[in-house]
Image: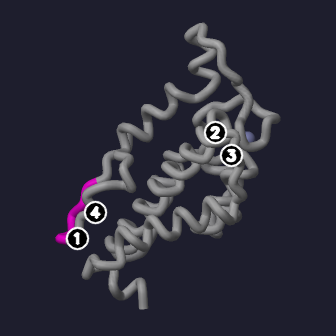
Amino acid sequence: MHLISWKDTCKPKIYCGLSIPSIESLYYACGCNIAARGLSVGTSCAFCNSNFETQNHLFFECDFTFSILLRFLPRMQSMLFRPNLWQVYSDIEELDVTSNMKNYYFLSISAIVYFIWRSRNDRLFGNCSESVSAITSKIKRAVYLKIHRKKCFQDMLT
Ligand SMILES: [Zn+2]
């Protein structure tokens, strides 16, 4: 696992409620892994209904979730293959930007994962299907609420 260290004085304390290890644990909750344990659940993706729900499909091989990612990181469109979640984190780590900007991207990715997972559960268990735009708006709002009072992010908000 790629470790992320927060070197600056501005250290986001949470990733919208998800830490990196708990994001990893989502892997075990994906439909294909639950079905492998003998539990009766749907194994197809809740967003496209045309692929097995694996962690890599959910984050971000699926057209639906990839389109959410592109709204935050449009440069992912130029990658040869669709990135998985860990490749997105690795790509951000290698960006030639300030550490605050990296922290902003890490926070955004964590929020994306969180709201995709919530939307997936809403579709499976709540009979509620939100659009890419609705999910994107929730992610933007959550990230904004996390950073708008942090002094180190003020230059990004102006
Ligand atoms: Zn899908």
Q: CA distance from mark 3 to mark 4?
A: 31 Å
Find out whether the residues at labels 3 and 4 contact each other: C-beta distance under 8 Å: no
Q: CA distance from mark 3 to mark 2?
A: 5 Å
* Residue 8 covered by magenta stretch: yes
Report the span colored magenta: 5-9
Find out whether the residues at labels 1 and 4 contact each other: C-beta distance under 8 Å: yes
Question: Which is more foreground, mark 3 or mark 4?
Answer: 3
| Residue at the outermost bottom position | 158
- Secondary structure of the residue carrying numbered label 1: loop
Is tag 3's residue or tag 1's residue first in the polypeptide sequence?
Answer: 1
Q: Quadrant of the C terminus?
A: bottom left
- The tag on residue 92 is none
Q: CA distance from mark 1 to mark 2?
A: 37 Å
Q: Nearer the viewer, residue 33 or 94?
A: 33
Mark 4: which amino acid? Pro
Q: Which residue is mark 3?
A: 128
Q: Which residue is mark 2?
A: 126
Residue 131: image location, x then y, percent: 72, 58
Q: CA distance from mark 4 to mark 2?
A: 31 Å
Q: Which residue is mark 1?
A: 10
Mark 2: which amino acid? Gly
Does 16 sit above or below residue 126?
below
Q: CA distance from mark 1 to mark 4?
A: 6 Å
Mark 1: which amino acid? Cys
| Residue at the outermost left position | 9
